[in-house]
Amino acid sequence: MREQLIIGNWKMNGSGAANAERVQGLIAETAHISGTAIGICPPFPYLAQVRGLLAGTAIRLGAQNLSDRTEGAYTGEVSGAMLHDLGCRYVLVGHSERRSLYGESDAVVADKFAAALGAGLTPVLCVGETGEERQEGITHAVISRQLQAVIDKVGIARIAKGVIAYEPVWAIGTGETASPEQAQEVHQALRLLLATQDRSVADSVQLLYGGSVRADNAAVLFAQPDIDGGLIGGASLNAATFASICRSA
Ligand code: PEP
């Protein structure tokens, strides 16, 4: 039985005061939720603040990115070891904004996945097709290529130490959500791809859906057999909305 997991990606939003209000609200609103794991990924500068605010709660901390290197002369980079030191459990890897805006290739994403594992973090690997790719009918080819690049780097067994998030690019931040059937179909394809290489990994790895999840569409998405929770962007910035999404899992 896979645990349900909901992770909030705050992206480049927040301030000391806004974070305190949001996290305190989230703690109050989620206090009675059981059986669903909850994580939040604030921007780097606020990880220590949010770690302090979360102390003594079950809400887990994550980061939005990490370096593919471990240490050294890499100005502006943040290593997995630093994130681990700051109390992070999760780190997003290969978010579509990193791939499209910052040129992260499949190879770099695979290196980051490996770096996260090496630092004792749980990488959340994001895969997904653009709108054009879906129209061309190459969704499965795209997500298979993105996932296989990571499998080739770390080996199939170590995929089980991460989480995979299917995030259709056309649904991220657009208000357009994949239908439950569309999302389930791709999640099933991801699980089948894993199963051809290791059935136990396929059965155990958590697959999250991300892309304009809201309080009013979360339950039907999370009810799909191969969807184990969600990666939530915009809607994670409001404590009451995010808590409502968490209650839907
Ligand atoms: C995301 O950034 O991972 C995401 C899913 O964003 P949104 O929920 O805003 O579409």
Image: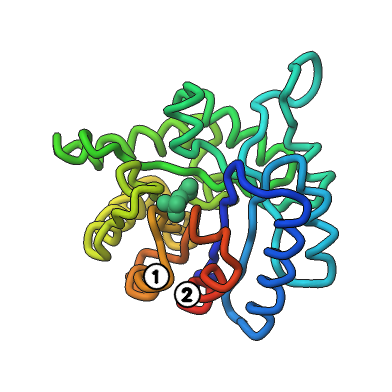
Q: Nearer the viewer, residue 102 or 249?
A: 102
Give the number of the disc on residue 218: 1
Q: Nearer the viewer, residue 85 or 150?
A: 85
Q: Secondary structure at mark 2?
A: loop
Q: Amino acid at mark 1?
A: Ala
Give the number of the disc on residue 249: 2
Where in the figure is residue 203, as x and y percent of width and height? 43, 62
Disc nearest the viewer among 1 and 2 = 1
User: In the picture, residue 183 is in which quadrant?
Assistant: bottom left
- Rate crowding at label 1 as few (under 14), some (14 to 19) or many (20 or more) other CA atoms within 10 Å: many
Q: Secondary structure at mark 1?
A: helix
Residue at 78 percent of width and 64 percent of height: 54
Residue at 52 percent of width and 30 percent of height: 109
Give the number of the disc on residue 105: none
Residue at 76 percent of width and 61 percent of height: 20
Q: In the current view of this chain or complex, which residue is farthest to the left? A: 136
Circles 1 and 2 in contact, beta carbons < 8 Å = yes
- Give above or below for 197 relative to 18: above
